[in-house]
Image (tube, grey):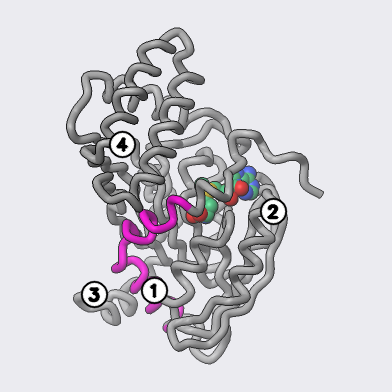
Amino acid sequence: MIVAPHPDAVFDAGWLAVRRAADSAARDERLNRLAAHWLRLRCAGRAARIVDLGCGSGANPVYLAPRLPGLQEWLLIDHDAALLARARRVLGSLRDAGGAPVSGSSLLRDLASLDDDALRDADLVSASALLDLVDVSFLDVLCARCAAAGAALLCALSVDGRWTLDPLDADDAFMRDAFNAHQMRDKGLGTALGPAAVDALCARLQAVGYRVWRAPSPWRLDCADMAVRALGFRLLDGWRDAALDQCPQARERILRWHGRRIADMARGVLRIEVGHGDVFACPAADAGPLEQMCGAC
Ligand SMILES: C[S@@+](CC[C@H](N)C(=O)[O-])C[C@H]1O[C@@H](n2cnc3c(N)ncnc32)[C@H](O)[C@@H]1O
């Protein structure tokens, strides 16, 4: 049974759809190749068991399945039944790198109770746009579970707190600080790490004996492009709402900033960069052959 998800951890399917192209463009290809080699080494002749934590509507398997070798058997986990149903449907249409269908199942589960057997047989544990929502104890459990299974971990698109807007506005730094502070509120999995998530994850992975690779995966949005503007408008609204929540006393200042930035966006003159980080890690004992396979990849 699942209790109602924390309201700050419920994501609109429209938001997940509008960010998908930017997410795909941002993710680090080398880390995908390491994950692919990892599965080749570990799973020769049998299906790879891949877990997607906080799968939402399935963006991560849509992106990864065709970049990874077959056979693939996914386990999709989320606490949002409607998003999970979408992801499950999407999974049915996916193909692996060799063009064969992938298979899998879904689990309606609060990640707060990850401390169970969901990861026991995993070969690769994956997540996208999730880790900034969790706290350090979640990372401790995640890393311990991965280490117990000997599984690799591929976590993409964790926000790193950096964002820049071009041209500059005098209140950008104020808005960014308000947003980053809001990111660290509890969203059902303890005090969220927000921008500190990637550093915290890497430290914990090293502590359980993992070799860690990390790479930046920023969104680079040129809002002269009409297709990008839909995401840009949603982003500005999200920053406004978070800042209003965080600093209600600065309401007029926030709304004036938002009004100026919406005008910039509508004129197509705004460029936005939002920092994220990707991480791939595997047991250090297996890292040598993996690096040899990857060579200059
Ligand atoms: C930002 S969305 C990312 C979704 C998807 N991975 C993607 O890249 O589009 C975060 C996802 O984590 C899920 N989530 C957040 N907190 C959760 C929790 N405590 N238990 C299970 N799922 C959770 C949300 O329902 C949502 O689908």
Q: Residues within 10 Å of mark 3 (few under 14, many from 20)?
A: few
Q: Distance between the residues labelled 3 and 4?
A: 40 Å
Q: Is residue 295 left or right of residue 73?
A: left
Q: What secondary structure is marked by label 2? A: helix
Q: Which amino acid does label 2 sit on?
A: Ala
Q: What residue type is labelled 4?
A: Ala
Q: Which of marks 3 and 4 is nearer the N terminus?
A: 4
Dot 4 corresponds to which residue? 266
> Which residue is the extreme one toward the bottom?
45
Q: In this view, does 69 lie above or below 250?
A: below
Dot 3 corresponds to which residue? 297
Q: What secondary structure is marked by label 3? A: loop
> What is the x, y in percent for residue 181?
42, 25
Magenta-drawn stretch, dominant element (helix, strand or loop): helix
> Which residue is the extreme one toward the top?
249
Regarding residue 143, the answer to whether it shows in the image is no
